[in-house]
Amino acid sequence: MLENLKTDKDILDFLMTSEFLEDEFKPSELRVLLLKFRWFYRSSHAKQESMKNKIDSLENKISSLESEKVDLSSENDKKDIKYDKVVNRKLSFKERITGNIYENKSRRKIRLFKK
């Protein structure tokens, strides 16, 4: 009976569709089928675990990128506010002459961009 099944695909199809009646098979043939089934199951289980690990690693990467996005967004908002404070006001005479821009009346210098 098993001589007709030449490829692994044929064996798997047979395993999935057979009724396994007792008078059809010899014990050695049943053992071969059982070993093949075990091999198919192990390979499919290994593929499933591999995909599960990939999905978990991608989910972790997505969450870290989302948190980084939130951090960068808040930093960008802070810089926009600072830039708007500097650009949308009139410069004093001293600021125009020296080229230094002060953030407030306490004469604290600000840098818009890091060097």
Image: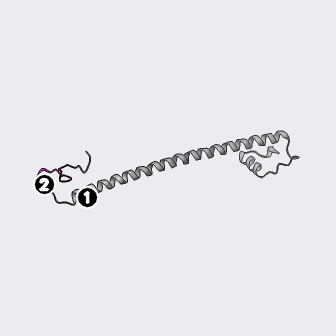
Q: Which residue carries the number 1 mark?
A: 84
Instruction: Residue at 40% x, 53% y: name it.
Output: 70
Q: Is residue 107 above or below residue 42?
A: below
Mark sitting on residue 5? none
Decide which of tag 1 and tag 2 comes sooner along the chain.
Answer: 1
Which residue is rendered at x = 22% and y = 60% of the image?
A: 88
Q: Is residue 60 left or right of residue 30?
A: left
Q: Is residue 88 magenta?
A: no
User: Would you say 106 lies left or right of 5 here?
Assistant: left
Q: Taking 101 as reference, is 67 left or right?
A: right
Q: How is the image coloured?
A: one colour
Main SS class of the magenta portion in the image = loop
Query: Total label count?
Result: 2
- Residue 56 lies left or right of residue 104; in this view the side is right
Disc 1 marks a residue whose amino acid type is: Asp
Residue wearing tag 2: 96
Q: Could you tell me how far apart the alpha carbons at marks 1 and 2 are, in whole angstroms?
A: 18 Å
Q: Which residues are magenta?
A: 91-108
Name, please, the residue furthest toward the right.
23
Q: Quadrant of the N terminus?
A: top right
Residue that sits furthest to the front in the current view: 106
| x and y percentages locating residue 82 in the rendered image | 26, 55
SS at circle 2: helix
The one of 59 and 75 positioned closer to us in this rendering: 75
Find residue 111 and report its horizontal and vertical position in percent. 23, 49
100 in the magenta segment: yes
Nearest the eye: 82 or 107: 107
Residue lying at 71% horizontally and 48% vertically, measured from the top left: 9
User: Is label 1 in contact with label 2 (beta carbons under 8 Å)?
Assistant: no
Q: Residues within 10 Å of mark 2 (few under 14, many from 20)?
A: few
* Image spot of residue 17 (x, y percent): 77, 52
Q: Residues within 10 Å of mark 1 (few under 14, many from 20)?
A: few
